[in-house]
Image (spheres, helix red, strand yellow):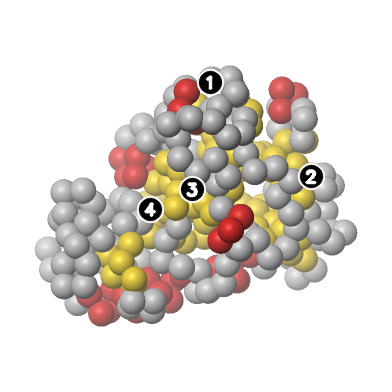
C-alpha cells in the first residue's frame, strides 16, 4: 500500500481542523453560539479522556450558557483520535495513507439538569458520526509515536477534530446543565478514540461558564472518582489522590441554539 508524502498529509489534516468554526455554527440560519470551550484555531490535539482506557461509558462536564437562545441546540464536541489506519501509536508504526480516511461510530450526546442526574437525561441524540484516523508517524520531525503538525511545528500523539450533533427536539435547554458524550468502544478503532479536554488555565473557554471544576463520568474504574460512586453518573468529586489525572479537565465542546 502506497503512502502519500508527509507534507500532503499535514496540509490535508490542517484543512480538516480549521472547519471547527463552521461546525460550531452548524444548524439553522438563526442559530447563536451560547457556549464555547473550543479554541480557534484548533490545535493538532488536546489532553483527552478515552472511554475504553478508563472503563467509562459516559464522560462530560457542567456548563452554563450565555445569551438567550435555548431552543433546538446543536452540540459540537472535539474528539481526539489515536487510531491508525494500520499499525499502532505505541508500536511506532502508525500509518494513515489517506488524510481523510475515517470510520463511523455511533456517538450519543445527553443533556441533564444540574442536580437531577438520577432523573435521567432531558434530551439525548445518537449520530453515526465519522471519525478520523490520526496522521502517520513522522520519524524525521518527531519520535516514532507522534505525527507532525506543520502548521504549528508541533508533534502530537492524537489528532483533534470536531463532530456535531443536533438536539432538535429540545425546546429549551437549561442555562446550567451537564452535557455528556458516550460511544461504544469495545472493539475496533473506537478503542483508540478519546474526548478532548482542557483545563481552566488553558483559557479555551470564550463564551459561557464552567460552574464547577469536576468532570462528570460513569465509570467502573475507581480512579475516575474522588468521592463519586463508580458505576453511576456523577461528578468526579474534588481534589484527592485519585489515579486519574486532571481533576479540573472539562470536555472541549460548544453549544449553539435558536
Identify the element where label 2 is drawn.
strand
Please name the residue that numbered disc 1 is placed on. Answer: 230
The label shown at residue 176 is 2
Circle 2 crowding by C-alpha within 10 Å: few under 14, some 14–19, many from 20: some
Identify the element where label 4 is drawn.
strand
Q: Quadrant of the N terminus?
A: bottom left
Q: Is residue 38 among what the camera can see?
A: no
Identify the element where label 1 is drawn.
loop
4 or 2: tag closer to the N-terminus: 4
Please name the residue that numbered disc 4 is placed on. Answer: 81
Circle 1 crowding by C-alpha within 10 Å: few under 14, some 14–19, many from 20: some
2 or 1: tag closer to the N-terminus: 2
4 or 1: tag closer to the N-terminus: 4
Q: Position of residue 98 (x, y in %)?
A: 27, 67
1 or 3: tag closer to the N-terminus: 3
In the image, farthest residue toward the left: 1
Please name the residue that numbered disc 3 is placed on. Answer: 195
How far apart in space, not on screen, are marks 2 and 1 (Cα)? Answer: 24 Å
- Write the residue at 27% across / 65% down: 147
Amino acid at each position: 500500500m502506497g503512502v502519500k508524502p508527509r507534507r500532503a498529509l499535514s496540509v490535508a489534516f490542517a484543512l480538516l481542523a480549521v472547519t471547527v468554526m463552521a461546525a460550531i455554527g452548524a444548524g439553522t440560519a438563526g442559530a447563536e453560539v451560547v457556549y464555547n470551550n473550543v479554541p480557534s484555531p484548533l490545535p493538532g490535539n488536546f489532553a483527552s479522556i478515552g472511554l475504553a482506557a478508563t472503563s467509562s461509558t459516559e464522560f462530560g462536564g457542567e456548563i452554563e450558557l450565555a445569551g438567550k437562545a435555548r431552543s433546538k441546540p446543536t452540540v459540537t464536541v472535539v474528539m481526539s483520535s489515536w487510531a491508525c489506519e494500520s499499525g499502532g501509536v505505541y508500536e511506532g508504526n502508525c500509518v494513515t495513507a489517506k488524510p481523510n480516511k475515517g470510520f463511523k461510530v455511533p456517538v450519543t450526546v445527553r443533556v441533564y439538569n444540574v442536580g437531577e442526574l438520577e432523573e435521567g437525561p432531558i434530551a439525548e441524540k445518537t449520530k453515526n458520526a465519522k471519525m478520523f484516523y490520526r496522521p502517520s508517524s513522522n520519524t524525521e520531525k518527531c519520535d516514532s509515536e507522534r505525527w507532525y503538525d506543520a502548521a504549528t511545528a508541533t508533534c502530537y500523539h492524537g489528532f483533534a477534530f470536531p463532530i456535531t450533533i443536533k438536539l432538535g427536539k429540545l425546546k429549551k435547554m437549561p442555562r446550567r446543565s451537564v452535557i455528556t458524550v458516550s460511544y461504544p468502544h469495545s472493539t475496533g478503532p473506537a478503542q483508540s478514540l478519546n474526548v478532548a479536554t482542557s483545563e481552566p488555565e488553558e483559557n479555551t473557554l470564550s463564551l459561557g461558564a464552567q460552574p464547577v471544576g469536576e468532570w462528570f463520568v460513569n465509570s467502573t474504574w475507581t480512579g475516575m472518582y474522588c468521592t463519586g460512586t463508580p458505576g453511576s453518573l456523577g461528578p468526579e468529586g474534588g481534589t484527592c489522590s485519585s489515579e486519574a489525572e486532571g481533576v479540573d479537565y472539562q470536555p472541549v465542546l460548544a453549544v449553539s441554539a435558536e
